[in-house]
């Protein structure tokens, strides 16, 4: 399978809406669907979610990483 990587920045309002939908899906134990830079992504309810923090000199980075394996 080919490697795919997409990344897109969103406004604070758009980000809040996406995070709110993700949180609601997690609370309900449901799958989550999101579109990132035109790529539609289906995240299963049993996906693993990690928070990652990095600091390099005066630059800080916080990532929310969601991982799952294909069921094929």
Image: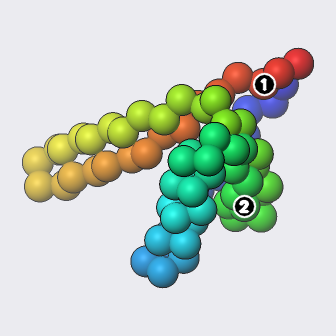
Which numbered dot is residue 35?
2
- Is 15 located above or below residue 28 in the figure? below
Instruction: Look at the image and name its color scheme.
Output: rainbow
Q: Is residue 13 left or right of residue 32?
A: left
Q: Position of residue 32 (x, y in %)?
A: 69, 50
Q: Position of residue 8 (x, y in %)?
A: 58, 64
- Is 24 located above or below residue 54 in the figure? below
Q: Is residue 23 left or right of residue 72?
A: left
Give the SS element for disc 2.
Answer: strand
Task: Residue at 77% x, 64% y: name it.
Answer: 38
Q: Is residue 57 left or right of residue 9?
A: left
Give the SS element for disc 1.
Answer: loop
Which numbered dot is residue 42?
none
Q: Position of residue 4 (x, y in %)?
A: 72, 40
Task: Residue at 54% x, 38% y: name it.
Answer: 66
* Residue at the spot of label 1: 70
Residue 35 seen in the current view: yes
**Gap between marks 2 and 1, in whole Å?**
18 Å
């Amino acid at each position: 399978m080919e490697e795919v990587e997409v990344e897109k920045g969103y406004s604070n309002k758009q980000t809040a809406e996406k995070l709110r939908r993700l949180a609601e899906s997690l609370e309900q134990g449901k799958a989550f669907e999101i579109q990132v830079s035109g790529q539609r992504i289906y995240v299963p309810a049993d996906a693993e979610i990690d928070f990652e923090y990095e600091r390099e000199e005066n630059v800080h980075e916080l990532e929310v990483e969601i991982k799952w394996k294909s069921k094929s």
